[in-house]
Image (cartoon, rainbow, N blue to C red):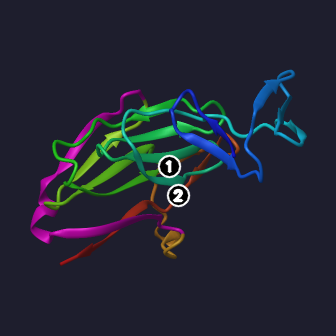
Amino acid sequence: SVQMWSLDTFEPMHRMKLAQPVLGLTVVDERFFYLFTEMEVKTFRLVHLHDTFAQYNSPIVHLESINNNYVLCVSEDSSARLVDTKNGESASTTVPQLSTKSLLEIKYNVALNRIYALLAHGEVHVYVCKTNPSIRKEVWEHTRKERLLAMCLCNGAVLGLDHLGMPERHLDLDVGREKKMAGEFMICGTH
């Protein structure tokens, strides 16, 4: 068989079984290699396999597309990153929680540029994502008594609340202009 190993991760990437044992391999250039067996010579064209988009020190447990510009990436160590889809760099990163078992859910609000981290004991940590690393701005201890299990974020207009005429404004990231919004809401599931 022929097997290709990544020298970055030291893991096998591709494997192809052959009928006869390989007696030799030669790389012709960056696009071609050949091998020979007792009875055959086979040539192969190397096709671009993949690019490493980004590497982190902790395994990834959750990816969520935010918009055309960012992906929310949650790691096993309970940190979260907003990753720029154009270059793979972290635009903002939350620090890991004290216990990796304590993180239940993470959501990102584009309009407010904040990450909400729901912890197992019911607290919600709110991070402002203007810098890297992000800044923990608030700790919602009052949510402990509710014993939150899950959360989702939505815009008031989605809920049909745009008639409230709330004065809050935000920058429309897609077109770069200011527009009125009905407010942002978090919907939570409890015990």
Disc 1 and disc 2 in contact, CB within 8 angstroms: yes
- Say the numbered circle drawn on residue 181: 2
Per the rendered image, the range of residues in magenta is 131-157
- Looking at the image, which residue is at 16% across and 42% down? 98
Q: Left or right: where does residue 124 sit relative to residue 151?
A: left
Q: Dot 2: what SS? A: loop
Q: Is residue 173 visible?
A: no
Q: Left or right: where does residue 11 sit relative to residue 125?
A: right
Q: Earlier in the sequence, mark 1 or mark 2?
A: 1
- Looking at the image, which residue is at 47% across and 67% down? 156
Residue tagged by mark 1? 111
- Say the numbered circle drawn on residue 60: none
**Are there few (<14), some (14-19), or many (20+) residues within 10 Å of tag 2?**
many
Q: Is residue 78 visible?
A: yes
Image quadrant in which you'd find residue 86: top right
Task: Choose between 190 and 102: the one closer to the eye.
Answer: 102
Residue 27's x, y, as percent?
Answer: 81, 24
Q: Dot 1: what SS? A: loop
Q: Is residue 143 magenta?
A: yes
Q: Residue furthest top?
A: 29
Residue 163's x, y, as percent?
Answer: 51, 72
Image quadrant in which you'd find residue 25: top right
Task: Choose between 130 and 101: the one closer to the eye.
Answer: 101
